[in-house]
Image (cartoon, rainbow, N blue to C red):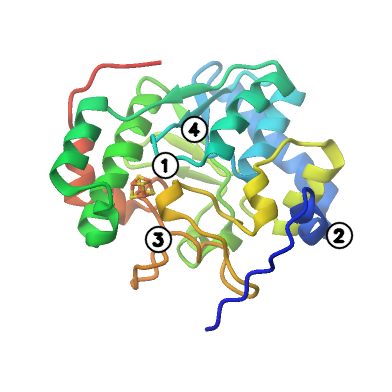
Amino acid sequence: MKRTIPIDSPAGAAVAAHAKPSPGFDQQVIAALATLRAAAAEFPDGIVQATSLGAEDMVITDLIARHELPIAIGMLDTGQLHDETVALVERTQRHYGLRIEIWRPDAAAARNFVATHGADAMRQSVELRHACCALRKLEPLARMLEGRQGWVTGVRREQSQQRKQASLHERDLQGRAKWNPLIDWTLGNVWHYIRLHGVPYNPLHDRHFPSIGCSPCTRAVAVGEDFRAGRWWWENDGVKECGLHVERLARSPEAKEFQQRDIGKQP
Ligand code: SF4
């Protein structure tokens, strides 16, 4: 497929392109809020939103902040994020007057990994890519979730083939509750909500990054390409996941090695 990435990308381009509400928009907002309220009521002070600061996660953060729900907000700073993503952390904190927990990989482990395999390890093999995701994402996520009873994500079924199997309420590998309040939302509804409420968002979305991960592993997508086509685009197996939401990858030997390490807590 020939990739044609539109070159004009003014601020607000993503809102202009995607904000198209479907008829059930209001009910979906009510349902998402009800899910968050029920989760918070079931486990008061025991759950966290694991945010990538992508568009869906910003909608969830807005619902949590707007309705003052007792749900913590945490993000994974892999050390490989785009400057725009890092800047959005502070922008979001200021906008809502809340604190976002920042969870980072073990510094020595990250240094050793790069020293052993090189800065471009993720391009050398799928195994090394999974190992990098395990080290920089899965292990810090495990610490974020330690001692918590549940977590909230922005997964939508529409996002990919793998995510079509996701449910509103799931159990993760540890049996912890996991909620995906936007599971049935369309992209149009996500962006309509962002426009309606002036939700801050990552300017990379205006530059044709529908899904935003680490800088070396994310690129803009062309017109007509899949939502997650810009993630690990050099791989052929079609599984555009790091293991946070796909159990098969989270169970990989590389992931297990890092998940089982006994590394001290950090904020
Ligand atoms: S997305 Fe890329 S840089 Fe980020 S943790 Fe995974 S392999 Fe490493």
The residue tagged 2 is 23
Distance, label 3 to label 4, CA atoms, is: 25 Å
Which quadrant would the C terminus be assigned to in this image?
A: top left
The answer to whether residue 7 of the structure is visible from this angle is: yes
- Label 3 CB, ligand 1: below 8 Å? yes
Judged by depth in the image, the label closer to the viewer, 2 or 1, is 2
Residue ID at (20%, 26%): 108
- Residue sitting nearer the eye, 41 or 136: 136
Residue at the spot of label 3: 232
In this rendering, does residue 182 appear at all? Answer: no
Q: State left or right for residue 50 relative to residue 139.
A: right
Q: Which mark's residue is nearer the viewer, 4 or 1?
A: 4
Q: Earlier in the sequence, mark 1 or mark 3?
A: 1
Which comes before the other along the chain, label 3 or label 4? 4
Tell me which amino acid carries mark 4.
Trp
Of callouts 3 and 2, which one flags the residue occurring earlier in the amino acid sequence? 2
Name the amino acid type tagged 1: Arg
Answer yes or no: do the residues labelled 2 and 1 have beta carbons within 8 Å? no
Residue 78, relative to residue 103: is it above or below? below
Residue 52 lies, in percent from the top left, at 53, 39
Which kind of residue does numbered mark 2 sit on? Pro
Of 141 and 185, which appears nearest the observer? Answer: 141
Work out how far the residue at label 1 is from the one at label 3, CA to CA, in angstroms.
26 Å
Looking at the picture, how far across and down is residue 140, in whole percent? 34, 30
Q: Secondary structure at mark 3?
A: loop
* Residue drawn at the location 36% of the way across and 37% of the way down: 175
Question: SS of the residue at dot 1?
Answer: strand
Viewer-side residue, 95 vs 160: 95
Badge 1: residue crowd in 10 Å (few <14, some 14–19, many ≥20): few
User: In this rendering, is residue 125 above or below 52?
Assistant: below
Residue at the disc numbered 1: 171
Query: Disc 1 vs disc 3: which is toward the camera?
Result: 3
